[in-house]
Image: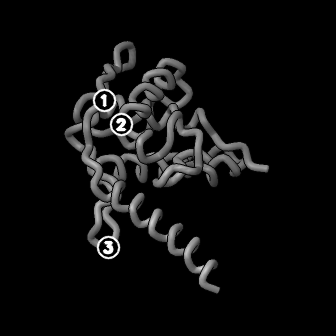
Amino acid sequence: MRKMISPLFAVLFAFLLSSSAIANEVAVAPSVEPAGLPVLGTSWLEGNPYRGNALAIDIGQQAYNQACARCHGADASTNAAPAPDLRNLNRYCRRIGDAELQAACLRDNDAYFAKTVRQGKVIVGITHMPPWDGVLKQELAWAIQTFIESRVRREP
């Protein structure tokens, strides 16, 4: 019985350490410029204007790897990172066959993404993701989302 407790304790201890690493994250602006993408200004749009834009995917990948990868995994390609797998963000929207309903779902997803990026994530008083408002340009945030959407996890 004692040998079973030790590995479990080790796993729980590792999880707690990784959780505290996330909780102490500070938003640091990536050194990526959104050159070539339409300028969006300071008032946040309700939806992602870059969805499907190849340049936005490239810029988003660079910005993601500088700003998001340490918590969410390099190139948004792993589910072993301590923070959620972002490739699942619009998973339910992708399943919708009706184009109008899917567009409404994507608008809701865009609103959730923008709110989370801007305000961060605080759960039970612990900051799990820092707020990026004022740190991350809107253009880069939407480019990051476009990149993440390009990395869709294929479901079995």
Q: Secondary structure at mark 3?
A: loop
At horizontal 36% and vertical 52% (from top left) the residue drawn is 116
Res 149 quadrant in image = top right
Foreground pick, 19 / 113: 19
Between 37 and 32, the one lying in front of the other is 32
Closest to the observer, 14 or 137: 14
For the point 43% across and 32% down, which residue is it?
Answer: 65
Q: Residue furthest bottom?
A: 1
Residue nearest the viewer, comparing 114 with 151: 151
- Per the rendering, the mark at residue 8 is none
Q: Secondary structure at mark 2?
A: helix
- Say which element carries label 1: loop
Is there a contact, CB below 8 Å, between mark 1 and mark 3?
no
Q: Which residue is mark 3?
A: 124
**Of the residues shown, which amino acid type is indicated by label 1?**
Pro
Q: Circle 1 is placed at which residue position?
A: 30
Image check: 61 left or right of 152? left
Give the mark nearer the N terminus: 1 vs 3. 1
Quadrant location of the N terminus in the rendered image: bottom right
x%, y% of residue 104? 54, 50
- Residue at 70% x, 51% y: name it: 95
Q: What residue is rendered at 27% in x and 55% in y?
A: 24
Location of mark 2 (residue) = 67
Residue most toward the right?
Answer: 156
Q: Which is more N-terminal, label 3 or label 2?
A: 2
